[in-house]
Image: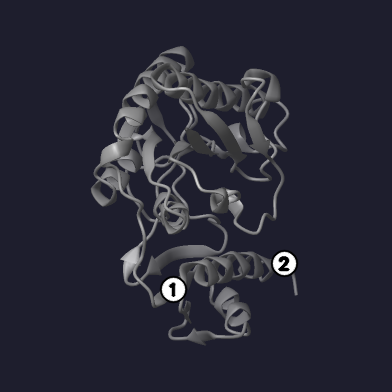
């Protein structure tokens, strides 16, 4: 069996501040990247307790160089580094039997979710695909689904877990913390979170026969609302983007990969608008 793991960090047990997940912070970040790595290891160990599997892990947080390799099994493959063509789903085209999302967080604007954002809190206010508001979990599940891979496990705060399960009801959710607003959480300890994740991963493997790849039906309409007007000013200059509001742009595509690539370019270009003129 082949297993894909997309590993984010904001949904890790104990995390409730940007300082804990920012690689520029020399004090807290090293502690929490280890907790992140151990949760990924717990998910892999739980999966392998249910079935032998070949594993590819995609480091999916910030600069995407967070995982501590010595915390992972020595026979897994790891994708690291930023600016990947498929970002948090790089490698999805290799096709897998199932995917895990570890350490995930809620969508921008979602209440009751710790550090909620959608790819970039600096440039993205809302993302919709075919009219559906999307979190990172939903955007990424659709990319994996395009290649026939169903998501069967998600870990993070309870709001993130439950909102993902509403769209993907076959997914096993492991809530490792309860949000108390944007910057606070009632959390399991790291060890307790790892035990819960391992158990959830074991159950998730048993759900594969009943899981479905999640997809958006083409044609695809991508709508992005930016944080600032000047970001939409930049994005509308891209080919095939249409300005439909002060902070809103639209992109039409015949396939999801094209729309996803357009989204990645758009939020990165939108970030450039934050630089001084």
For the point 35% across and 19% down, the residue is 199
Percent across and percent down for residue 48 are: 46, 21
Snapshot quadrant of residue 183: top left
Q: Quadrant of residue 154?
A: top left
Q: Nearer the viewer, mark 1 or mark 2?
A: 1
Question: Image point 47% across, 32% down: which residue?
Answer: 1
Pick whichever, 230 or 163, lies toward us: 163
Is 207 in front, or is 116? 207
Query: x, y (%) of residue 232?
Result: 55, 78
From the viewer's perspective, tell me whether residue 175 is left or right of residue 183: left
Q: Is residue 239 above or below residue 212?
A: below
Label 2 secondary element? loop
Q: Label 2 crowding class (10 Å Cα cut-off): few <14, some 14-19, many 20+?
A: few
Q: Disc 1, disc 2: CB below 8 Å?
A: no
Label 2 sits on residue: 275
Instruction: Choose the circle earlier in sequence order: 1 or 2.
Output: 1
Pointer 1 residue: 222
How far, Cα to Cα, is label 1 from label 2?
A: 25 Å
Seen at 66% across and 71% down, the residue is 273
Q: Is residue 142 visible?
A: yes
Q: Is residue 188 visible?
A: no
């Amino acid at each position: 069996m082949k297993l894909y793991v997309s590993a984010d960090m904001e949904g890790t047990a104990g995390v409730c501040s940007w300082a804990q997940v920012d690689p520029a912070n020399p004090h807290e970040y090293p502690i929490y990247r280890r907790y992140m790595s151990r949760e990924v290891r717990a998910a892999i160990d739980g999966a392998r307790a249910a079935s032998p599997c070949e594993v590819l892990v995609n480091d999916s947080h910030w600069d995407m160089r967070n995982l501590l390799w010595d915390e992972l099994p020595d026979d897994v493959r790891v994708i690291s580094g930023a600016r990947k063509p498929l970002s948090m789903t790089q490698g999805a085209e290799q096709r897998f039997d199932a995917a895990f999302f570890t350490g995930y967080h809620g969508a921008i604007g979602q209440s009751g979710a710790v550090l909620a954002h959608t790819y970039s809190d600096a440039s993205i206010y809302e993302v919709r695909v075919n009219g559906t508001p999307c979190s990172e979990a939903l955007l990424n599940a659709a990319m994996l689904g395009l290649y026939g891979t169903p998501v069967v496990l998600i870990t993070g705060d309870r709001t993130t877990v439950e909102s993902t399960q509403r769209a993907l009801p076959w997914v096993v959710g492991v809530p490792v913390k309860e949000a108390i607003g944007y910057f606070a959480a009632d959390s399991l300890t790291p060890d307790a979170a790892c035990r819960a994740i391992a158990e959830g991963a074991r159950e998730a493997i048993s759900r594969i026969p009943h899981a479905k790849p999640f997809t958006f039906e083409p044609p695809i309409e991508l709508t992005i609302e930016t944080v600032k007007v000047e970001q939409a000013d930049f994005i509308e200059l891209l080919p095939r983007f249409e300005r439909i509001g002060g902070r809103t742009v639209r992109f039409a595509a015949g396939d999801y990969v094209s729309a996803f690539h357009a989204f990645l370019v758009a939020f990165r270009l939108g970030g450039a608008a934050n630089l001084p003129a």
